[in-house]
Image (cartoon, helix red, strand yellow):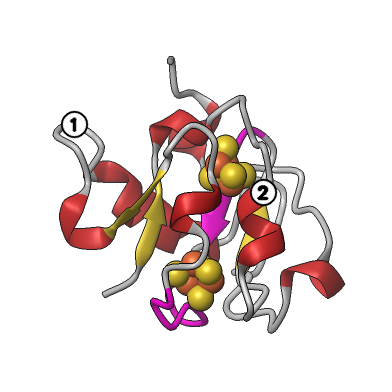
């Protein structure tokens, strides 16, 4: 189980959550941020920091947003558009920098 960023982050990308994560495991795509499920330890510090309340515990995703559980994982487990290898667990979002790309679902997501 992990915390997951949902639809309300898309095109907002406030990044207040990034400052709160003690493990630096919230990565920046293009339209939204993604929590690395293999690096997150469920401390929950990020959840209250988001001004649009886009972060949920995996089991508490609002109706219709369950797909973002898979998309947060897909961002790390499958090669992103334009890349040949999956990101995996880069070991720190600050050092990794901005991915600048989203999963295909998020890239095409209509708010
Ligand atoms: Fe970080 Fe939030 Fe997980 S603060 S460790 S991404 S619950
Ligand atoms: Fe997104 Fe909220 Fe973080 S808008 S980048 S989940 S603070």
Q: Nearer the viewer, residue 48 or 1?
A: 48
Q: Nearer the viewer, residue 86 or 93?
A: 93
Instruction: Give whichever of discs 1 and 2 has the lower sequence position.
Output: 2
Q: Is residue 77 above or below residue 56?
A: below
Q: Residue at x 25, y 37 (%)?
A: 65
Label 1 CA crowd tier, 10 Å (few <14, some 14–19, many 20+): few
Residue 20 sits in quarter: bottom right
User: Measuring 67% from the left and 37% from the top, which residue is drawn there?
Assistant: 14
Q: Which residues are magenta?
A: 31-43
Identify the element where label 1 is drawn: loop
Q: Is mark 2 within 8 Å of ligand 2?
A: yes
Of the four image quadrants, the one with ligand 2 is top right
For residue 61, above or below residue 46: above
Q: Residue 108's x, y, as percent?
A: 49, 23
Question: For mark 2, does the 10 Å Cα neighbourhood hold few (<14), some (14 to 19), or many (20 or more) residues?
Answer: some
Main SS of the magenta part reads loop
Secondary structure beneath dot 2 equals: helix
Say if residue 76 shows up in the picture: yes
Question: In x, y percent, where is residue 87?
Answer: 63, 70
Residue 47 spot, x, y in % from top left: 44, 55
Residue toward you, 30 or 9: 9
Residue 4 shown left or right of residue 88 in the figure:
left
Mark 1: C-beta under 8 Å from nearest atom of ligand 2: no
State left or right for residue 101 relative to residue 64. Answer: right
Residue 84, image x and y in percent?
67, 63
Mark 1 in CB contact with mark 2 (< 8 angstroms): no
Which residue is the site of mark 1?
64
Asked whether residue 36 is in view, the answer is no
> Which quadrant of the structure image shows residue 13?
top right
The residue indicated by pointer 2 is 16
| Residue drawn where x is 67% and y is 48% of the image | 16
């Amino acid at each position: 189980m992990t915390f997951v960023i949902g639809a309300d982050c898309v095109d907002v990308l406030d990044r207040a959550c990034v400052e709160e994560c003690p493990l630096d495991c919230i990565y920046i795509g293009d339209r939204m941020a993604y929590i690395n499920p293999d690096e997150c330890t469920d401390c929950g510090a990020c959840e209250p920091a988001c001004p649009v309340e886009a972060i949920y515990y995996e089991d508490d995703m609002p109706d219709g947003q369950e797909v973002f559980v898979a998309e947060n994982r897909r961002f790390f487990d499958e090669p992103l558009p334009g890349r040949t290898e999956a990101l995996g667990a880069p070991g720190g979002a600050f050092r990794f920098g901005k991915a600048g790309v989203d999963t295909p679902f998020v890239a095409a997501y209509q708010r």
